[in-house]
């Protein structure tokens, strides 16, 4: 016949459960911070546009969780956005996007990040303007999150901040720039 | 404090981000990495890891191929192989288990979940 747990045992069990939950929470946070650190370092060490955009794509696929996304840059005459790189997206359809058109074009005009409340198969779920506060230089558009990723988390927005800054550099560098030394 | 040698994990993934993140997250273990399936097979044979983390979509030899190859070797037939992939649909999961993987987790992975799965197999 088993004895009922004593109050001290109950207390210890509860403390143990609390500690386990805390450890799990901290490990999750550590994972998120690790992803941010790795993304930041990888982006910092990219020395040309292609390498930078490769890291951007790698982070979106493996850390944020999307296999359908695209990066656009504003054309020199600022009339439209041109596709720079795409993954899992129809390049013919999105080769050029007029400013103000759809979620992508709208973000380029408003310079505001867009996160969809309702998913639309024909529009991206996340649009991140790239540039400086008073000048948009491009856009990162994520068309679909992986099925196992129901929504963006706070850490994903921090990652998107990093990616926007990196994409700004990549766009500013242009297609033929190669950094000779790490930029200040 | 334990004086046991650290367990060894082989991380096979063509993503430099995943390899870098894995090395940092799994600092309690010895982590060896490979960037494609063929290199992964060679390193698994050479390093005899205690656990293998394996991506699916990779150049040269995909994760399913790596798994099948390793399971044919007697010394690696029982090593825990955890497939990590963006492909979470039932078809791919079934294919993973068919190829001989022990566990299947989807990307982007949660750091706490990954550590828990690893500890379930090989401890701290």
Image (spheres, helix red, strand yellow):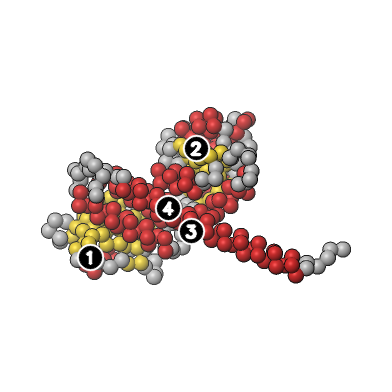
Residue A133: give its label.
Answer: 1
Task: Answer left or right for A161 relative to A148.
Answer: left
Q: Mark 3 and mark 2 in contact (Cβ < 8 Å)?
A: no
Question: Marks 1 and 3, Cα distance to the nearest angstrom?
Answer: 30 Å
Position of A170 with respect to A26 (left or right) is left
The location of residue A152, given as percent across then percent down, is 42, 63
Measured as percent of width and height from the top left, residue B105 is found at 53, 50
SS for callout 3 = helix
In the rendered image, residue A1, in percent from the top left (x then y), is placed at: 87, 63
Residue sitting at 62 percent across and 64 percent down? A18
Q: In the rendered image, which quarter is residue A65 located in?
A: bottom left
State which tag comes first along the sequence, 1 or 4.
Answer: 4
Given the image, what chain letter belongs to the residue carrying mark 4?
A
Task: Give the residue at mark 4.
Answer: A35
Q: CA distance from mark 1 to mark 2?
A: 43 Å
Q: Can I make out residue A75 in this image? A: yes
The verdict on a common chain for dots 1 and 3 is: yes
Viewer-proximal residue among A66 and A93: A66
Q: Residues at marks 2 and 4, common chain?
A: no
Q: Position of residue A158 (x, y in %)?
A: 37, 60
What element does badge 1 sit on?
Answer: loop
Above or below: residue A68 compared with residue A135: above
The answer for which chain carries disc 3 is A
> Tag on residue A29?
3
Q: Which mark is residue B32?
A: 2
Q: CA distance from mark 3 to mark 4?
A: 10 Å
Discs 1, 3 touching: Cβ within 8 Å: no
> Element at badge 2?
strand
Neighbour tally class for label 4: few under 14, some 14-19, many 20 plus, Cα within 10 Å: many
Q: Is residue B12 left or right of residue A136?
A: right
């Amino acid at each position: 016949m088993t004895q009922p747990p004593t109050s001290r045992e109950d207390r210890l069990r509860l403390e143990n459960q609390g500690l386990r939950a805390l450890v799990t929470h901290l490990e999750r946070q550590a994972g998120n911070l690790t992803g941010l650190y790795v993304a930041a370092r990888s982006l910092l060490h990219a020395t040309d546009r292609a390498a930078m955009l490769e890291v951007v794509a790698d982070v979106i696929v493996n850390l944020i969780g999307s296999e359908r996304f695209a990066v656009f840059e504003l054309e020199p005459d600022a009339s439209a956005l041109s596709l720079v790189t795409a993954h899992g997206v129809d390049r013919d359809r999105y080769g050029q996007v007029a400013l103000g058109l759809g979620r992508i074009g709208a973000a380029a005009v408003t310079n505001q990040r867009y996160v969809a409340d309702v998913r639309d198969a024909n529009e991206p779920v996340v649009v991140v303007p790239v540039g400086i506060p008073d000048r948009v230089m491009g856009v990162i558009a994520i068309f679909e999150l992986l099925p196992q990723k129901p929504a963006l988390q706070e850490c994903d927005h921090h990652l998107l901040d990093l990616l926007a800054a990196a994409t700004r550099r990549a766009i500013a560098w242009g297609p033929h720039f190669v950094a000779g030394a790490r930029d200040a | 404090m334990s004086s046991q040698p650290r367990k060894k994990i082989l991380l096979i993934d063509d993503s430099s981000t995943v390899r870098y993140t894995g090395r940092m997250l799994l600092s309690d273990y010895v982590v060896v990495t490979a960037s494609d399936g063929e290199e992964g097979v060679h390193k698994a044979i050479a390093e005899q890891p205690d656990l293998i983390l394996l991506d699916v979509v990779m150049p040269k030899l995909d994760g399913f191929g790596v798994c099948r190859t390793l399971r044919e070797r007697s010394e690696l037939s029982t090593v825990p192989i955890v497939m990590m992939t963006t492909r979470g649909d039932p078809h791919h999961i079934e294919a993973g288990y068919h190829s001989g993987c022990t566990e299947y987790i989807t990307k982007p992975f949660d750091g706490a979940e990954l550590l828990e799965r690893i500890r379930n197999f090989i401890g701290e």
